[in-house]
Amino acid sequence: MLSLILVIVLLLCQHIQAFLSVDSDIVNSYHFNDSVPLVVNKITSEKTKVPFAYGELPFVCPFYDTTRKQQRSLLNLGHILQGDRFMKSNFELNFGHNSYCNQLCTVNLTKKDIELAKELIQLDYRAEWLVDGLRGLSQDSSNIQHRKWLPQFKIGYVDKFTSKTLLYNHFNLRLQYQTHPTDASIKYIVAFEVYPSAIHNVNTCTFSQNSTAAVLGASASIRYTYSVSWEESKIITWNTRLNRYQQHTHPRIYLISICNTLICTLLFIGISGMILMRTLARDISIYNRESKDEFNDGKHQGWKLMHGDVFRPPRYSTWMGPLLGSGMQFLNMSMFTLAVGLLGLMNPSYRGGFISYAIALYLLSGQDRLFTGYTSNLMHHVFKEDRKSWTQNALEATFLVPSVIFTIVFIINSFVWSKGSSAAIPLSTFTTLILLWFGISAPLVYLGAHLSQKKHTQKGDFEPPVKLNPIPRYIPDQPWYFEPIFRCAVGGLVSFLVLHLNMYYMTLSEWSSKYHYMFGFLIIISITLAITAAIVPIGVTYFSLCCQDYQWWWNSFRISFVSSLCLFIYSAYYFIFYTNVLGLVPAVAYFGHSLILCLVYGLCTGTIGFFATYGFMRRIYTSIKID
């Protein structure tokens, strides 16, 4: 098995390296008159969230002859999934050399090209260019009093007085640099700004009242020009050059709100934990002092009465192992990815790097995949599923959750592909993912299941601490507030409240293409969420046992999993009231990605809730004396 995995890894080594590579924060140094490449990427709009490759638009300048294979070599998996399509432009930028009104190209437009340009301008599409890894900043002039920096710039505008659509055909490029403190000949680029304009006199790059050179439809051709200015910055340094990309609209409110949420959550966890521990200590003390006859006289209704049924395997237990195995895998992936962000091992300017790193952990990390098979087969032993072999259990763990995610992604990709968007995943990417899955991930799941089977077949480590009654105990009617639907809804809502505020700002940052780089707070919230997802099902299970309801297996998973349903409802609320998205395709993409996010989140919290409750049940029933 290991030899087969090694052979496959070696065969795919070169492609995997490029496919899952992550750019680091490499310091590029320049000297005067050095050629500086300008890379164009894509255009995006907050009204559609359907990106298009800038270099493939029919109304922009054609670029140097670059084959698609060479273009693709610049992309990692994170870039592809975000719709990035980097292409080298034919802007001539020489470090430190100012230039004015450079002729770029002349583009002849057809009627179809003009209509497309008008449509994209009316939908407020913005272009993304990069120099030395920095996206070109522009100022949002919609609110003069509170102007803010945006990492894209508009490709045109509609004149309010004449209702004519104008295409920006001149670009003022402003670049700032920092000089090395010991070697004055070495320079570093620390800022890149783009100021587009619609000029009418293409010879002098000035505005002419009677010219219609930039008006779409008035001329069959558009001539593009650009100007470049360089200046040394005394304020922005290499270490602070990303600060303008990380601006939050209300950072102080964000921090105060997060602190308030954390304080309330910690108080809830602390009070609930203390009450539960004191109650359990008292119950165990009472139960251990009583004899068997005193306890079974019918006067007591405590959780000890359930000892003969509490570890009875639940219905549909065959599905629980694969779900818990996948949840354990996603937990490991999330923890390692957050740790990478917290330690600063990956620069925030390379946003595709985090996605690539997370998927690499999901696909290639032996620990994660071993956990999936190991955990799934472990639960196979806990439930004593003799009617199903461990290989069948491993097969379900391999394909159950990934097949659901793959189906959702395929549906989203079909809609996005129909629009010709750069966000559509190419067939070669799908093929590579499938090869990685069958060549590396699936064998590791079977390896983990095999190790679990070999370790626990003989030891019997997971035998229940009490004997099961031959006949299941009758469960009396429960009060309305302890019906499964009600307790799952309340428990899930409590877990969701820990996350909802941070989700608002994270969604806002993603929707406005800003960096969300507060990993310290994100990890604190994740830890608090994990504790909440553990203690809430424990508390609900304890009170359920006191009401003589011993069916806790699925409830412990569902209570924490339901918080993902709350998250999906919140995503729908945000989509309706906080976005101005137009069209079916953006809606399908938004809700599809939200569904995947909620599924992963629910599996993580459900797994935490289940194993916390399972450990709690074994602990309390091991602590009491049962004759």
Image (cartoon, rainbow, N blue to C red):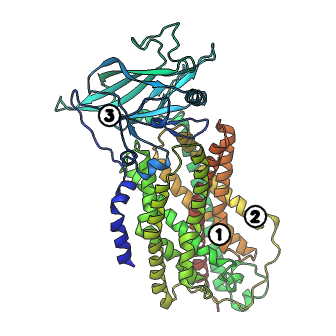
The residue drawn where x is 33% and y is 59% is 14
Looking at the rendered structure, the secondary structure element under dot 1 is: helix
Q: Quadrant of residue 242?
A: top left
**Residue with the mark numbered 1:** 556
Looking at the rendered structure, the secondary structure element under dot 3 is: loop
Q: Residue 273's spot in the image, x, y percent?
A: 60, 64
**Residue with the mark numbered 2:** 485
Q: Quadrant of residue 309?
A: bottom right
The C terminus lies in which quarter of the figure? Answer: bottom right
Q: Mark 1 Cα within 10 Å, few/some/many (few <14, many 20+)? A: many
Q: Mark 1 belongs to which amino acid?
A: Ser
Q: Nearer the viewer, residue 321 or 422?
A: 422
Separation of marks 3 and 2 at Cα, in angstroms: 59 Å
Q: Mark 3 belongs to which amino acid?
A: Pro
Q: Mark 3 Cα within 10 Å, few/some/many (few <14, many 20+)? A: some
Q: Looking at the image, is 432 positioned above or below residue 49? A: below
The residue drawn where x is 68% and y is 47% is 572
Q: Mark 2 belongs to which amino acid?
A: Ile
Q: Looking at the image, is 307 positioned above or below residue 59? A: below
Q: Nearer the viewer, residue 236 or 363?
A: 363
The residue drawn where x is 53% and y is 79% is 377
Nearer the observer: mark 3 or 2; the answer is 3
Q: Residue 228's spot in the image, x, y percent?
A: 34, 22
Q: Which one is earlier in the sequence, the residue at label 2 or at label 1?
A: 2
333 on left or right of 257 = left
**Residue with the mark numbered 3:** 37
